[in-house]
Amino acid sequence: MKNNRVNYFANTKRVVVKIGSGVLTESKMLNVSVIRSVSKQVHTLVENGCEVIIVSSGAMASGEKKLGFNKRPDEIPRRQAIAAVGQPGLIIEYEKALAKYNKKVAQILLTSDDLNHRERYLNARNTIYTLLSWHVIPIINENDTVVIDEIKFGDNDNLAAMITLLMDADMLIILTDIEGLYTKNPKTSPDAELVPAVHSIGKDIEKMAGDIPGPLGTGGMLSKINAARKVTDAGIPMVIVKGEEPEILTMLFAGEEHGTFFVPKEKKLPSRKCWLAHTLKPKGALMLDDGAVNAIAKKGKSLLPIGIVRVEGNFGVGAPVEFVDKKNRRIGIGLVNYSADDVRLIKGLRTGQIESCLGSRPYDEVIHRDNLAITGVE
């Protein structure tokens, strides 16, 4: 494992570094010393030929400091307003810290809606590619001032995973307030042990992570595990380490073992399949019978109407829809060729019966195999 980890870092030419709220916040204020420390390390990586993309929390902490808030408000408009005040200050601190090393920064604010649409997804990627080609360091955050639940990433761990997939990065590093994934919550259990490596993310790993909450941000350890699942599915490794550790990035790239390393899958999803599986938010669900689940998950077939048992939600043609088995376990997600109303009419029918039911048969498949991705079956 040690050699594999060393090799992964040695071959990393593009890395996404996510810096969490727990690292960037000190006494409810922005921890500028951490920004300066990370910026110095980023400079070292860039000088050694590695492209670095930063996903940074901290806008709320920056805004609270400016406005003199002692407590983070519960109301969404007030939280969004605080983030709006804090975001410029956050970027200014990065700009000042990296200017010492003659590095320029760019601010990019995104919502999940920007990545759900394929054209906007590609536009975002092209913009970041251009910045990297200019040796400008992109600093990305969720656009908290406009985000609503429907277009929210959920947390910056998820955003970091999305950016890692978007940019075909070689590594995702999450800087947090503890050393990595523990068998129990290390802050309450003295016998908790650090997990140095995770080869497969199962229920046992999820249970460990579920016991370790996040200090300030919306994402605890479980959100980091979900991020790891996304990137390792794409063949990209991830590591969780303590961000306040001096020179932690430099040490990782020097071959030292720190934190928890998530080993990527050897058989990875293609880029478009990753976009389908891990970026799109489903607008509805299709329950499938056992035969359809087997045909899609094991044999690589398209989804035909005969295998559909139930339809949930209201969606239009081309919408992302998840499909589940009879126990409601998620199998995957895909882009549908028919609206929810039409699928309700043709579910359980053979392909040859579609035209007599709908009056036309534009497609044989409800979801073509090229437009679906399996996420829930090993």
Image: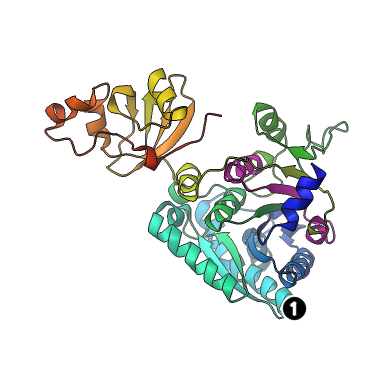
State the SS at label 1: loop
**In magenta stretch: residue 76:** no
Judged left or right of residue 238, residue 301 is left
Query: How many marks can you see?
Result: 1
Which image quarter: residue 138? bottom right
- Residue 28: which quarter of the image? bottom right
Residue 338's spot in the image, x, y percent?
Answer: 26, 37
Establish if 311 lies above or below 16: above
Asked if residue 82 shows in the view, the reply is no
How is the structure coloured here?
Answer: rainbow
Residue appearing at x 41%, y 18% in the figure: 290
Please identify the quadrant where the N terminus is shown: top right
Which residue: 43% across, 47% down? 150
Could one spot residue 237 in this view of the protein? Answer: yes
Horizontal and vertical percent position of residue 238: 68, 48
Residue 171 on image: x %, y %: 66, 53
Q: Nearer the viewer, residue 311 or 290?
A: 290
Q: Which residue is mark 1?
A: 101
Work out whether residue 271 or residue 227 is closer to the camera in this orientation and state it.
271
User: In which quarter of the view is residue 235 placed?
Assistant: top right
- Residue, far right: 190
30, above or below 236, in the image: below
Residue 126 shown left or right of residue 54 in the figure: left
Whether 250 is among the magenta residues is yes
Screen quadrant of the C terminus: top right
Q: Amino acid at mark 1?
A: Tyr
Q: Tell me if residue 124 comes above or below residue 159 in the rendering.
A: below
Horizontally, residue 67 falls left or right of residue 309, namely right
How dense is the environment of label 1, judged by Cα within 10 Å: few (below 14), some, or many (20 and up)? some
Residue 117 at x, y percent in the picture: 39, 54
Magenta stretch in the rendered image: 224-252
